[in-house]
Each structure stands twice: as structure tokens, then as C-alpha cells.
Amino acid sequence: MPSALVVYVMPKYIQFMKSAVLAKDYPVHKMAEVAIAGRSNAGKSSFINALTRDKVAKVSSTPGKTRLLNFFNMADSYVLVDMPGYGFASRSHSEVLEWHEMIEAYLMTRENLVGLILVMDIRREWTADEELLKKFSDERGFPLAIVLTKADKMSRNQMMSAAMKMKKVSGLSAVFPVSSLKKTGQDEIERYVFENWVKQ
């Protein structure tokens, strides 16, 4: 008997579940989890706001939660996990170590995790920080997609060239230029995540 067709439907509500650092504090549920990582100035909050209709980043940016894993129920479809931003020019060595340990523990052990979205400013180069996250993806075997924010800062030709360059440098084919200002690209990445990661 053929399987039922699963059609993507934009989430109608988003609910904050909890914040956590340690695995023992992760929420217990049976849904797939999609994590989002990015530099603190990469436009991650704006991108998440666009996905969640301006709900998630309000919680994730509140004092005390910016350095935690924040879990959000996306209309019982999947769970979005907002990870703390990286790029540590102003942070101590111990803080960097704590971030690394928290992120590695989550990415390498969380059974619900089905994929990671890496948010990057389209004008930035691929660095050792991004390579580290890709290493976790390769070792654990979960897919990685790149979202290139602030695409409105470039012409269409420049944007396409930057996306092609990122595909070559990263070795990844799932690269999505987006603009929160022009509200372009978000639907494509969310549909891609649902079709290829969540409903599998």
C-alpha cells in the first residue's frame, strides 16, 4: 500500500519548550530536531525571526539565554534548536571552552538531531569555526545546510557568485542565500529542511 503523501505546511504556532546546557536537561519528546548555528553577528536572529514569525529570537536573546541551547516546538512538526552564537573576540578562554563542550555534546550525542543549519554573512569567508561544525556533521553523519544572510547587500550576480564559491569551499551543495530585509529565501530553506530532513 503506497505511503501517504506528506505535504509541507508552514507552522501555525511556535512554543518555547526550555533552555538547557547539559544533556540531562534536554527536553524529552519524539520529534525531529533541527539546530541552527552561526556567528553572533551573522544575522542568525533575523533569520530565525523570519522562520518563526518573530517569536523565537525574542526568547533566545533575553538575558541568561544567549549562551544556552534554546528549544522551540514548531507546531508539533519539529523542534528548532537555537544554538549560542560563536566568534569569541570578547570572550575568555574558559567561555570558549564551555561553548565548545556544550555544542559538541549536543551535536555528537542528540538522537533527535536530523540536521544543522549554519548561518553565515554572505560577505564572510569560510573559517576554522565553520570547518569545526562541518567536522561534527561529517563525524556524526547528519546533514548540513548553509544559509547566507544579508544577500540584499549584493547584486544578484554577486550573490550567485558568492553562493557558488561557498559550495566549492565548503564542499556542500545545500547553500541558500536569504535576505530578511527583502524577505527572500526563507521559504526555500524551510521547505528544504522539511522535505529532506524532517519528514524522512
Image (cartoon, grey):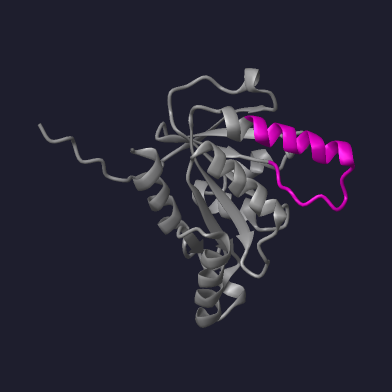
196 in relation to 70, above or below: below
- Magenta residues? 84-105
- Regarding residue 57, the answer to whether it shows in the image is yes
Using the rendered view, name the quadrant where residue 23 is placed: top right
Residue found at x 55% / y 71%: 165
- The residue lying toward the viewer, choosing from 123 and 144, is 144
* Quadrant (top left, top right, bottom left, bottom right) of the C terminus: top left
Across and down, in percent, residue 92 comes to: 90, 42
Question: Would you say residue 86 sits in the magenta stretch?
Answer: yes
Q: Is residue 194 left or right of residue 7?
A: right
* Quadrant (top left, top right, bottom left, bottom right) of the N terminus: top left
Residue found at x 46% / y 62%: 185
Residue found at x 81% / y 49%: 88
199 in relation to 109, above or below: below
Residue found at x 66% / y 70%: 123
Q: Is residue 38 left or right of residue 198?
A: right
- The residue lying toward the viewer, choosing from 72 and 135, is 135
Q: Hey, which residue is sitting farthest front in the picture?
A: 139
97 in relation to 131, above or below: above
Using the rendered view, name the quadrant where residue 4 is placed: top left
Across and down, in percent, residue 43 comes to: 65, 57
